[in-house]
Image: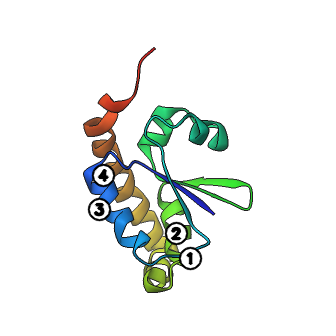
Amino acid sequence: MKVYFNNSCKICKAEIDLYKKEKIEQINWIDITNNQDAQKETNRNDSELLRRLHVKKDGKIFSGAKAFLIVWKNIPKYKFLYLIFKLPIIFQIFSLFYEIIAFFLYLKNKKQIKTN
């Protein structure tokens, strides 16, 4: 499983660093910052990658709140978050809040996108 995240965003990096501490061998953490390979692997442009967390698992790409569910499900210490946030009503609320926060983080970090 590959997790595509923005290592240049202090908030994103801080959260991912917590997950990395668990040393889950099945998770390959990929920094999307100026990473054309990540764009090719996900079939997403740099703006789309910057906008949301992405996970590639079993050949499929998941983004946003669904991507977080997959990450949490695969880290034993955080599996309780998966069990809570996968519940339908809670997931809808989580998705909404995720999109709001992700939008503001995107606005804060979009200057890192290279323009050709």
Image location of residue 14, percent across then percent down: 29, 62
Image location of residue 21, percent across then percent down: 39, 75
Name the secondary structure under disc 3.
helix
Q: Earlier in the sequence, mark 2 or mark 3?
A: 3
Query: Residue 43: which quarter of the image?
Result: top right
Within-10-Å neighbours for mark 4: few <14, some 14–19, many 20+ = few
Query: Residue 38: which quarter of the image?
Result: top right
Q: Earlier in the sequence, mark 3 or mark 4?
A: 3
The residue to which callout 1 is attached is 74
The residue to which callout 2 is attached is 71
Spatial separation of the CA atoms under disc 3 and disc 4: 15 Å
The residue to which callout 4 is attached is 101
Q: Amino acid at mark 4?
A: Ile
Name the secondary structure under disc 1.
loop
Which residue is farthest top? 116
Spatial separation of the CA atoms under disc 2 and disc 3: 15 Å
Name the secondary structure under disc 2.
helix
Instruction: Tell me whether the residue at label 3 lies in contact with that at label 1, contact meaning CB atoms closer than 8 angstroms.
Output: no
The residue to which callout 3 is attached is 14
Instruction: Tell me whether the residue at label 2 lies in contact with that at label 1, contact meaning CB atoms closer than 8 angstroms.
Output: yes
56 with respect to 67 (left or right)? right
Q: Amino acid at mark 1?
A: Asn
Residue situated in front as seen by the camera: 83 or 14 = 14
